[in-house]
Image: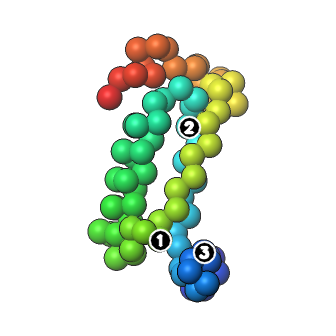
Amino acid sequence: MGEGNLVHLADDVFEPIIMVLVEYRRGRPHELRLQLARRIAKACHQILQFPEKNVLIEFTPHDGNEIYRNGEWVPDWTPNEATAK
């Protein structure tokens, strides 16, 4: 998007941000999503030298029948998969 095109208003000042959108199958515990978000923010900091506090991550849950892969809908998580770490 180019420099200065992705910003967030914080404390009445525009700050540059990185916006990450994670589309995933519904059913994973929110604790696992939080772990993933923290790892993504840390990776953005380590690789891109970008402040972790300026990495915004949005999770969008989907049923399996909203995700297409290899000619079929993705199956929903089984109870075992939904809680596996």
Instruction: Give the SS element for disc 3.
Output: strand
Q: Nearer the viewer, mark 1 or mark 2?
A: 1
| On screen, residue 39 above or below 19 | above
When asked about the image quadrant of residue 76, the answer is: top right
Q: Is there any visible trace of residue 48 in the rendered image?
A: no
* Residue of label 2: 24
Labels 1 and 2 touching (C-beta < 8 A): no
* Residue of label 1: 54
Residue 20's spot in the image, x, y percent? Answer: 54, 58
Mark-to-mark CA distance, 1 and 2: 22 Å
* Residue of label 3: 8
Labels 1 and 3 touching (C-beta < 8 A): yes
Instruction: Characterize the local packing of mark 2: few (<14), some (14-19) or many (20 or more) Cα atoms within 10 angstroms.
Output: some
- Where, quadrant-wise, is the C terminus in this rendering? top left
Instruction: Give the SS element for disc 2.
Output: strand
Q: Is there any visible trace of residue 85 in the rendered image?
A: yes
Residue 56's spot in the image, x, y percent? Answer: 52, 62
How is the model colour-coded?
rainbow
| On screen, residue 48 above or below 61 | below
| Kind of residue sitting beneath label 2 | Tyr
